[in-house]
Amino acid sequence: MGRHNKTEVLEPVQPVRDSADGRFEGTLTPEGGDGASMPRDFLSQPETLKVFEHHLSPNSKLGLGRSAVRLAMQEAAYQLANEPLSSEQEDRRKEYLEDARDALAAMDQKQSEKMERLLADQPQSPWLNQSLGTPQKEGSAFVDRLTQQDHAGKYLVNDQLLQHFLEWHNSVLANRQHELEETIEPIREVFKQKVHKAVRKGWLPETVLEKLHRIDEVAVYADDGFTTALAKRRGYARVTAKEGEARIVLDPRVLDDPTEVLEHEYGHLLEGEDRTAEENPPENATRLRKSHGLYRLFGAGTGGRSANEAMNEHLRSSLQNGNIDLIDPDSRKRKGGYPKERNLLEALVYGGVINVDIRKFSHAFSEENVYDNRFSATQDLYNSLRKAFPFTDVVKEIRELPRDVNLNDFVAGLKERTNRYKKQHPIKALRASLNKAA
């Protein structure tokens, strides 16, 4: 890891912005002169401030050091209004910068290397690179340097330079957010058309159409990697108990073509829900794990997550390929995500004494208010699985899967037990296969 003998004190920087579309250019450039007492031209124009505020919405809560950057935005707003700054501003700045350093320092080596690669993929600031170095595809020297200290405990990258780095980093994120917003509408409209077609084919219940407004209303955000790539996920959907606060967050590595990941996350918004378990939820509480999708049947743990993600990804793949009955990821031209989980789903559908219609899974995944309906699709799916696997309570087994389970081993074992049952009880197996509708 590289170490510098002194700390550079740099001038404020200004991102160039295209006035036609409000987009920040990717390169930061220094101002002229010695910069010793230069105003913060980075955020000195009302138009620039407005654009930056939009693309780094306070609701997204994404972006390394965003609190420090938002504080700088507030300061710029005060300056534009000729209002004095609060005496607490500088203390808050130090606190926010320390939070950013803590987030960087908390990463393990693999995460640091991954973050370095993500930074290397961003548009670069030659001026910042002169003082900080350039992020590389290999190693983590750039990321490490942001938190390095000398023998006296002084940071090699001082607060002013770290602030400029965070402003550059978040302006890149703002650009990505702007580009993402331009690509979302056609993806969203095509997805809704696919859902309508799936309902007509009987893959999904008609009640799903009543939830399509969620696709229009959900906020979609670009992440800088901290909540996605570093957490080993390409995206996630967060649905709150309060209407209108759903959000989808995407890994920066999928932003060039976000269709598949975005459609997968859209699918989560169409999961069936039960509110009876939380009639008076806290205002900002996320929905209970057991209250939606296949979690309601397979539990809130590893098994429930595996079944739910498998069904959601299989549904996305089926909407794309036009065949809901073909489940095995290896049989698809485009395999998609969650292969181990989808192998589990394939085993539940085709690995028993009799087959279980995949549509029973998709309807249970999507239906509303299971606990208020004695004749629910979820109950129907449970009954079918008991018939398909008469030698065990397979639902109970999946609910009790440990966190570190090897799903491929579990699937192989389940199929082996099915074959053993067929050999030991050929008459029962034959009767079951002849009485699929029972």
Image (spheres, grey):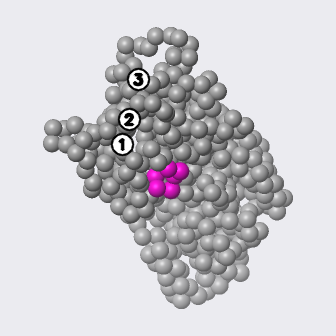
Q: Amino acid at mark 2?
A: Leu
User: Residue most toward the top?
Assistant: 83
Q: Is residue 432 above or below residue 56?
A: below
- Marks 1 and 2: CB-CB under 8 Å? no
Q: Is residue 84 magenta?
A: no
Q: Where is residue 252 drawn, in percent x and y?
A: 54, 52
Q: Which residue is mark 1?
A: 103
Q: Which residues are magenta?
A: 119-124
Position of the C terminus by quadrant: bottom right
Q: x%, y% of residue 414?
A: 50, 76
| Location of mark 2 (residue) | 10
Looking at the picture, which amino acid does disc 1 mark? Ala
Up/down of 353 relative to 258, above or below: below
Mark identifier at residue 328:
none
Please state which of residues 225 and 301 is positioned toward the viewer in this rendering. Answer: 225
Q: Which residue of the protein is positioned furthest toward the right in this rendering?
A: 200
Q: Position of residue 145 (x, y in %)?
A: 31, 48
Residue 417: x and y in percent read 49, 80
Q: Is residue 10 left or right of residue 408?
A: left
Other-residue count near label 3 (Cα within 10 Å), few / some / many at <14 / 14–19 / ≥20:
few
Q: Earlier in the sequence, mark 1 or mark 2?
A: 2
Rendered residue at 51%/16% (across/down)? 78
The amino acid type, in three-letter code, at marker 3 is Ser
Element type where label 1 sits in the image = helix
Identify the residue shown where x is 27% and y is 56%: 1
Kindly report which numbered mark, 1 or 2, lies closer to the viewer in this rendering.
2
Labels in figure, total: 3
Judging by the rendered image, the residue that carries numbered circle 3 is: 37
Front residue of 266 and 163: 163
Label 2 vs 3, first from the N-terminus: 2
